[in-house]
Image: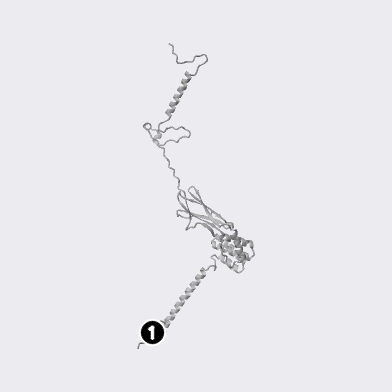
Amino acid sequence: MPRALIYYRGCMLPDHASDLRPAVRRTTAAGRDRRGSLRRAFASWLALLVVVCAPGVAYAHPLLDEGERKYEDADFQGALDAFARAEQASDLTRDDLVRLYTRRAMVHHAMQHPEELEADVFRLAHLDRALRLPRAAPPAVRRAYEQAVARVSGTLRVDVEVESMPGGTRLVARVSDDNAGLVQSLRVRARVAGGPWRRTERAALEVPAAAGATVEYVAEAIGPGGAVLTHAGTDDAPLRTTLAPALVEAATPATTTATAGSAASGGSAAASGTSSPAIPGAPLRVDEGGAPVWPWLVAGGVVLAAAVVVVALFVVPGPAGDQPVSGPQVSF
């Protein structure tokens, strides 16, 4: 008869192997401990990831965190001080600025400052006209924000005008629809054909470039806290303009055909191969066939002078009482 088989946790053991049961139990318990440790470690990492990535848990900027904490502690003046220091910083983002104006509007509402509240929600409406206010925002703040959105007619933007200049181009940045006065400065940078960037903290930038070159450029409007409020182009996708090619004028050289007589006389015009520029109003010195005109002019003048003399001698009458002379008289 076959030996009795003992089943333990899926393992089939013969009856004579009953002494192995304690070892199996110890091994199984150790496996359970390892699996439990792995589960606990994974749960800890997952909890940490949720805390770090969860929205609304903590702001990116420490001054905003400080202002939020003071607001929750009902230290409203301390919250205003923290927000004012954040507004004077240089490392805020656009989202940071939205949060700053949202929380500060709530602080102004708590301190019963209606004018300051309207000013902050008006700035907020210029940054984002479709903002979802936090659940903690009081109804009065929500109404003020909706009224501010209704007063905003355009979207804050920055445009760049490209002007031609000798030896390159000039980029001029301009801001539109900034009724809240958010923009504090303009930043322009440009480069030629993928070269190094040229930067300026002013509204205009002159870029030396050859004719036909492509200029890439980016413009940014900088607001409180150094935040980039809006931009035209990015470093990865800049705007582009191509300079007009240079106009090449083909100059026709003045050629002079030297005759045998002029070559023998060693004329300077034939030797140099150029002719002197024409004087405005002066008669042409060469006709279509290339023959000089001045001998004909001289001959015509001589013939005209001779005709005048003949008329004066033979046609015009002399003094009174004299007979007209019909011709020369010869006495013998």
- Residue type pointed to by label 1: Leu
Q: Position of residue 9 (x, y in %)?
A: 42, 82
Above or below for 151 versus 276: below
How many residues crowd mark 1 within 10 Å: few (<14), some (14–19), many (20+)?
some
Residue 246 horizontal side relative to residue 63, left or right: left
Dot 1: element = strand
* Residue with the most extreme right position: 112
Q: Position of residue 113 (x, y in %)?
A: 64, 63
* Residue with the most extreme bottom position: 1
Snapshot quadrant of residue 64: bottom right
Snapshot quadrant of residue 57: bottom right
Snapshot quadrant of residue 11: bottom left
Judging depth in this view, the residue of 42 and 237 nearest the camera is 237
Q: On the image, numbered disc 1 is attached to which residue?
A: 13
**Quadrant holding the N terminus:** bottom left
Q: Position of residue 85 (x, y in %)?
A: 58, 62
Residue, x 38% and y 84% (percent of image)? 13
* Residue with the most extreme left position: 1
Above or below for 9 versus 96: below
